[in-house]
Image: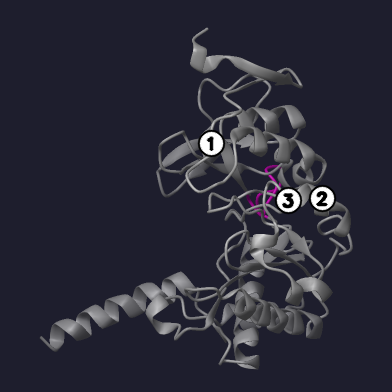
């Protein structure tokens, strides 16, 4: 075995190597910090990942971060996979199912920093388990604005009789999760668009559903595109960002008093007792109101609307030349 592959430690039968190397530029953390964090939160993170096709973001030493969907051929036999057709790349992709601590530790040793599960389970890909509203503030330190937009979303959901929970994205934004049951992909997508539109209507000075950045005018983008087979970074997952922040659940009452910088792979272990189980207080049997779904069906998906608008602007620019 070469010196670079020296085994520093073995956990759950997984050999861990190069633990004292820097994790990535600006992380202020080592690979050991990543492994220790993921191991410490495994009982909370694994329920977010289990049974769901998983994409990860890895960082090789001295290289840029990259997203990995297809499990590499050298993966050990204990890493379970599930195959789905990827329309974008026109090929079948073998996604990992990270169902146990051993698999999570293997990913940690692969320098997988971020964990992005789908909103559907592999065994039931036609029925999402959550709606997600991703609140993306404008450039700069806009977390407070994202919190204000999250409260608009919560008000809409309360009016619709839907309970929700919230977490930091681990970047600059906020994720609102709404557990649901029995909804089709189409129904979930429509309901998510309707919630976003209603939130924008409550306070259009704070929130916008404009998909094109140049149309957002410094407002918080209420992203309604995370549906079904789409992925969202898991609660308790680190992010490849300066300081190695972690996407962390927050009680609604505490949301005004926190900052994304409060939660890093080196600090969250001391804060785990301050939060209950992610999604633990919300019933997964919530049904989508029919009026919310019907309202959303009349709203064009953001990406489609942006595509048509982009083409229109291009034509208009050409006519004015």
Residue 57: % across, % down = 53, 43
Neighbor class of circle 3 (other Cα within 10 Å; few <14, some 14-19, many 20+) is some
Of pointers 2 and 1, the one earlier in the residue sequence: 1
Q: Is 97 placed left or right of 66 in the picture?
A: right
Residue 78: % across, % down = 68, 22
Q: Nearer the viewer, residue 297 or 154?
A: 154
Q: Which residue is mark 3?
A: 267
Q: Which mark is residue 22?
A: 1
Q: Residue 30 colored magenta?
A: no
Please say if the residues under marks 2 and 1 sit with CB atoms less than 8 Å apart. no
Q: Give the answer, above or below, for where 262 lies relative to 310.
A: above
Q: Which residue appears at 48% of the width and 74% of the height? A: 302
Please say if the residues under marks 3 and 2 sit with CB atoms less than 8 Å apart. yes
Residue 127: % across, % down = 70, 56
Numbered range of the magenta stretch: 117-126
Question: How far apart are labels 3 and 2 at the CA level?
Answer: 6 Å
Q: Which residue is mark 2?
A: 270
Q: Residue 120 colored magenta?
A: yes
Whether residue 291 is visible, yes or no, is no
């Amino acid at each position: 075995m070469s010196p670079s592959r020296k085994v520093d430690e073995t956990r759950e039968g997984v050999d861990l190597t190069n633990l004292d190397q820097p994790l990535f530029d600006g992380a202020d953390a080592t690979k050991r910090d990543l492994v220790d964090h993921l191991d410490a939160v495994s009982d909370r993170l694994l329920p977010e990942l289990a049974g769901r096709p998983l994409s990860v973001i890895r960082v090789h030493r001295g290289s840029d971060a990259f997203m990995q969907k297809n499990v590499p051929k050298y993966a050990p036999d204990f890493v379970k996979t599930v195959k789905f057709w990827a329309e974008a790349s026109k090929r079948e992709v073998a996604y990992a199912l990270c169902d146990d601590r051993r698999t999570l530790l293997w990913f940690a040793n692969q320098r997988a920093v971020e964990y992005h599960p789908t909103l559907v389970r592999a065994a039931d890909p036609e029925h999402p388990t959550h709606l997600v509203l991703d609140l993306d503030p404008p450039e700069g330190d806009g977390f407070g604005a994202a919190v204000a937009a999250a409260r608009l979303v919560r008000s809409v959901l309360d009016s619709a009789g839907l309970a929700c929970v919230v977490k930091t994205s681990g970047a600059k934004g906020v994720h609102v999760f709404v557990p649901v049951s029995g909804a089709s992909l189409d129904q979930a997508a429509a309901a998510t668009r309707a919630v976003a539109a209603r939130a924008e209507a409550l306070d259009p000075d704070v929130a916008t559903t404009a998909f094109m950045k140049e149309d957002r005018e410094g407002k918080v983008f209420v992203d309604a595109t995370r549906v079904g087979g789409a992925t969202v970074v898991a609660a308790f997952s680190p992010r490849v960002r300066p300081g190695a922040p972690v996407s962390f659940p927050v009680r609604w009452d505490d949301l005004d008093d926190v900052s994304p910088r409060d939660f890093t792979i080196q600090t969250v272990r001391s804060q785990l007792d301050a939060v209950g189980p992610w999604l633990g207080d919300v019933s997964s049997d919530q049904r989508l109101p029919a009026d919310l779904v019907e309202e959303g069906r009349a709203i064009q998906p953001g990406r489609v609307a942006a595509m048509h608008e982009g083409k229109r602007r291009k034509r208009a620019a050409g006519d004015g030349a």
